[in-house]
Image: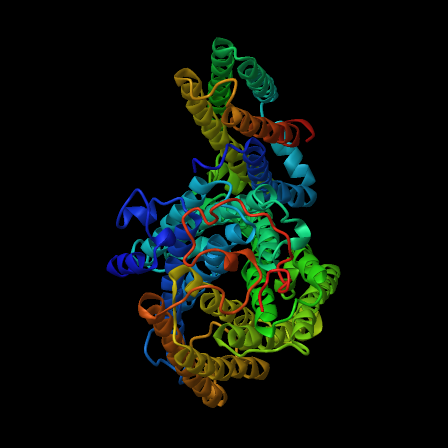
């Protein structure tokens, strides 16, 4: 912990004054900021693990036939890449790390409603992560089912599915408890004057996310329990030979896992809604619509799970209903995009690192969202279902969307919490390389999918060879950019120039307190007198 | 954290949210029940008639009584009646024990008759019955786990009342645990008719 101690000595604030010292002052701390950083390091660590697995996948697909691993290892690689990225990085990603760091300060609170429960959530996360990791190296070896654990294969494969599924079950518990904590906090601990109409849009997005976490996660929990019961007790609930129906598993799985997509993207949209007005020096356009659209996405997004199952053999009526509802979700998403763009209009735009990540979010999310409509329409989905088009689509939304927003948030908020800042030029360079590599990698995947290359296949026809090579080269460029961005952040936050005050001119409450924030955030309870994007009211030039 | 004064409303809000998640957890099982009932109404009916109505009805009465005692314990602690609270909570615990004992007898009778997951009798029998008993064991088993967790929580509350940490002025943890206990009761109120009565 030497780096953390050095930071504490220079930075002060919550880095210091804790009754405990060393590692104990972190893993047993109930301070939301310390827990937020614990999450940040954990999710970032697993993100890098997932990146390495992804690079290995691309390396294998660089040329037809066997390249670096066997087919069995390849199956394990894409499964573990998915499990790590989804359950260990992107679901807890923004809400648990930046949500914990920033949300209580943004509403003028000293902590969340249940600080000990908050710490317990992190411990559950850490336990679940360890169980998932243990499943890779014990029993029948790493699971090879894909992150979706579809029956009947997941009920029969000899690999260590039960333990991995149990790990995900624990992670779900952690997610639920964070959701409960955030909803209660936002209801109960808003400072005087912090009305719902003055809630920063990041908080609104976390609020909608927390409801999805509460209402959807229990369904995956019971579904995972059923998979374990199928494997250990032989219940036969999904076994057609015994009267069960495997399609019911898909329904239950996606009742959670589609809303989970919004657990991943909504907080990212919240980050973008914070950054765009600050770096345009202009109040956000359409505050109410952005706030309401977060809740609308959460609500409508809970009713569209069937669009993952157009080819599963469910009824045509169900297909049409789910397709229709899927198009409904596009409306609140588009409302957000148009409002962000309108905020930019005639703004005094300053292209610093957080803003570049935020702007690329809008572009990449739009590409991902529009390709999502191709998948949402049943007629076109049947042709590209389970192809690389799907892989390209969700990486545009999840990585181009949430991943870029994660780095936007890191560049925007972390200097506030470390009291030091990264260097701007390497950040811009890293962003540019990431952006180029990203598009080479995932746009090529979408083209490959259109041409008919299936996903999760170890080998492919020779006509796909050239584009696969291009995509793999793209993955290297993306990785180089990522390394630059992460190293620059790391170096800057621990050894960079001091960062004080409110250099970007934010009007939300976190910019009104000392840098780094003191342990109790506010010396005395704040009274809020202006809106989150009322720069004049906040006295920001 | 010490500086935040105890927020009872917040604590109860959090508990209610958690109870939603528990309802949804069982909701997944009820969805499967609904779908498979629609597919195999006759075989579900045959399965339901094999369950013991006396065991089921007795357990319903036992759980309802336990819930009543738990609710009375909340009133008792608010009046400051410590000994009455302890007696009422012990009554709830006793009911939990009786419920689990009856459940044990019920399950073992079924298992003796060769009805259990993956049993040769179920595999050879009609598919709807296999699904029915698969759901029966999973649902009542998960409910049984909740009874055990609820009882452990009540035991923890009993210790708190004994030590004086929970008293007339500070009893939100007792109230929250009894809320949890009512949920355990409530889920059973749905399980009982669905599996024992209507088929």
Q: Position of residue B138 (x, y in %)?
A: 52, 38
Number of numbered tags placed on the structure image = 0
Q: Is residue A187 above or below residue A432?
A: above
Q: Where is residue A355 in the image (x, y as percent from the top left)?
A: 53, 74
The residue located at (58%, 26%) in the rendering is B182
- Determine whether, in the image, residue A509 is placed left or right of residue A55: right
Q: Position of residue B26 (x, y in %)?
A: 58, 39
Q: Position of residue A237 (x, y in %)?
A: 54, 46
Q: B103 or B176: which is nearer to us?
A: B176
- Determine whether, in the image, residue A356 is placed left or right of residue A286: left
Q: Is residue B132 above or below residue B60?
A: below
Q: A438 or A337: which is nearer to us?
A: A337
Using the rendered view, name the quadrant where residue A206 is placed: bottom right
Return the residue found at the far left: A2
Colouring: rainbow
Kindly tell me whether residue A178 is visible in this rendering. Answer: yes
- Determine whether, in the image, residue B60 is placed left or right of residue B156: right
Kindly tell me whether residue A381 is visible in this rendering. Answer: no
Q: A75 or B71: which is nearer to us?
A: B71
Q: Quadrant of the N terminus of chain A?
A: bottom left
Q: Quadrant of the C terminus of chain A?
A: bottom right
Q: Is residue A406 above or below residue B25?
A: below
């Amino acid at each position: 912990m030497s780096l953390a101690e050095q930071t504490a000595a220079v930075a002060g604030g919550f880095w210091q004054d804790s009754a405990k010292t060393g590692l104990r002052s972190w893993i047993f701390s109930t301070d939301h900021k310390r827990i937020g950083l614990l999450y940040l390091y954990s999710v970032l660590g697993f993100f890098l693990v997932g990146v390495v697995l992804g690079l290995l996948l691309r390396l294998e697909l660089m040329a037809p036939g066997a390249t670096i691993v066997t087919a069995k290892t390849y199956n394990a690689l894409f499964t573990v890449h998915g499990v790590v990225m989804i359950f260990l990085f992107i679901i807890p990603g923004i809400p648990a790390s930046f949500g914990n760091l920033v949300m209580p300060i943004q509403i003028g609170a000293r902590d969340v409603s249940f600080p000990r429960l908050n710490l317990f959530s992190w411990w559950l996360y850490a336990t679940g992560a360890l169980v998932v990791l243990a499943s890779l190296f014990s029993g029948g070896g790493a699971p090879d089912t894909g992150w979706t654990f579809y029956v009947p294969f997941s009920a029969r494969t000899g690999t260590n599915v039960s333990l991995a599924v149990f790990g995900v079950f624990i992670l779900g518990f952690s997610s639920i408890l964070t959701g409960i904590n955030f909803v209660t906090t936002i209801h109960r601990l808003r400072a005087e004057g912090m009305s719902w109409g003055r809630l920063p849009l990041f908080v609104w997005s976390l609020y909608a996310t927390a409801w999805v976490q509460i209402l959807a996660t229990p369904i995956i929990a019971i579904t995972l329990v059923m998979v374990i019961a199928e494997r250990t007790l032989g219940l036969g609930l999904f076994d057609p030979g015994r009267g069960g129906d495997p399609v019911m598993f898909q329904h239950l799985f996606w009742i959670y896992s589609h809303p989970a997509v919004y657990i991943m993207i909504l907080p990212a949209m919240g980050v973008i809604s914070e950054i765009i007005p600050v770096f345009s020096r202009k109040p956000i356009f359409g505050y109410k619509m952005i706030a309401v659209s977060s809740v609308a996405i959460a609500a409508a997004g809970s009713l569209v799970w069937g669009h993952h199952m157009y080819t599963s053999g469910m009824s045509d009526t169900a297909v049409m209903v789910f397709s229709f509802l899927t198009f409904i979700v596009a409306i609140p998403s588009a409302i957000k995009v148009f409002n962000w763009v309108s905020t930019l209009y005639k703004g005094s735009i300053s292209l610093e690192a957080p803003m570049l990540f935020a702007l690329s979010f809008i572009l990449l999310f739009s590409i991902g969202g529009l390709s999502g409509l191709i998948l949402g329409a049943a007629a076109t989905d049947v042709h590209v279902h389970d192809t690389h088009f799907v892989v390209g689509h969700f990486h545009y939304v999840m990585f181009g969307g949430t991943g870029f927003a994660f780095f936007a948030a890191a560049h925007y908020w972390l200097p506030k919490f470390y009291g030091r800042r990264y260097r701007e030029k390497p950040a811009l360079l890293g962003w540019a390389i990431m952006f180029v590599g990203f598009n080479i990698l995932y746009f090529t995947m979408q083209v490959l999918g259109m041409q008919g290359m299936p996903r999760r296949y170890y080998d492919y026809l020779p006509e796909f060879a050239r584009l696969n090579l291009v995509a793999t080269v793209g993955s290297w460029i993306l990785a180089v950019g990522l390394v630059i961005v992460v190293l620059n952040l790391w170096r800057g936050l621990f050894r960079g120039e001091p960062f004080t005050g409110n250099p970007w001119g934010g009007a939300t409450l976190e910019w009104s307190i000392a840098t780094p924030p003191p342990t109790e955030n506010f010396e005395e309870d704040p009274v809020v007198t202006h809106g989150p994007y009322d720069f004049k009211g906040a006295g920001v030039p | 954290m010490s500086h935040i004064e105890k927020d009872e409303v917040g604590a109860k809000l959090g508990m209610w949210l958690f109870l939603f998640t528990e309802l949804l957890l069982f909701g997944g099982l009820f969805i499967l029940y609904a779908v498979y009932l629609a597919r195999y109404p006759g075989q579900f009916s045959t399965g339901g008639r094999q369950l013991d109505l006396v065991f089921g009805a007795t357990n319903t009465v036992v759980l309802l009584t336990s819930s009543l005692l738990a609710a009375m314990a909340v009133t008792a602690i608010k009046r400051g009646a410590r000994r009455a609270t302890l007696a009422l909570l012990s009554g709830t615990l006793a009911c939990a024990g009786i419920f689990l004992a009856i459940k044990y007898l019920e399950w073992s009778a079924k298992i003796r008759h060769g009805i259990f997951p993956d049993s040769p009798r179920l595999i050879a029998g009609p598919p709807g019955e296999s699904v029915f008993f698969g759901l029966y064991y999973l649902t009542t088993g998960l409910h049984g786990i909740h009874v055990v967790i609820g009882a452990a929580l009540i035991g923890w509350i009993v210790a708190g009342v004994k030590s004086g940490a929970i008293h007339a002025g500070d009893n939100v943890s007792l109230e929250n645990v009894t809320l949890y206990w009512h949920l355990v009761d409530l889920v059973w109120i749905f399980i009982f008719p669905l599996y024992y009565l209507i088929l």
